[in-house]
Image: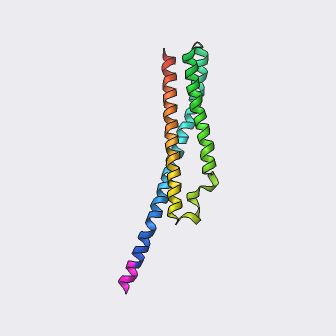
Amino acid sequence: MKYLYIITIFLFVISCLPSNKLDDSNQKILGEIIIEHDVLMEKMGEIKKLENDIKSILSEDSLSEKLVSSLRNSNKMMMKFMQDFSDEFPYDKYPMNSKDNKGDDEFLKDVNQRLKIQKEIILNISKSFDKSIFNAEKSLEK
């Protein structure tokens, strides 16, 4: 009888693990998104400075217009990401923080997929930032 009790508890604990793993994964992905967001926010000042430098140093031609457009586009992508992310995951109501959803594997899987999509978006924005900054700096060196 004692073994049956131990086995029952063991099976119960194991059945709860996927939710814990999903919840941990969701928190980890959210943390990665926030870190990348913070890095990009620091770069936004650099983007504005490069835009101003291009306008004041380089002659107005198609190259300078393209560089400014690329910098502005990166900035707009970030602004759109922040708005969309905030709409989908309001700061005070992160769905994975709700006690009501802790045991709901399907719900947590859905949140996990949505977070993965948001992470992919912010990583693409990061690439856009890096590319536009690199091109602007390279053109200003000439």
Magenta span: predominant SS is helix
Residue at (51, 61) in percent of width and height: 106
**x, y percentage for residue 122?**
52, 41
Left or right for 37, reference 3: right
| Rendering colour mode | rainbow
Q: Which residues are magenta?
A: 1-7
State which quadrant residue 69 falls in: top right
Residue at (47, 59) in percent of width and height: 22
Is 4 one of the magenta-colored residues?
A: yes
**x, y percentage for residue 94?**
59, 55
**x, y percentage for residue 40?**
54, 37
Taking the view exactly as shown, the residue that stands out farthest to the bottom is 1
Which of 115/31 is in front?
A: 115
* Image vertical order of residue 14 relative to residue 129, above or below: below
Is 24 one of the magenta-colored residues?
A: no
Residue at (49, 50) in percent of width and height: 29
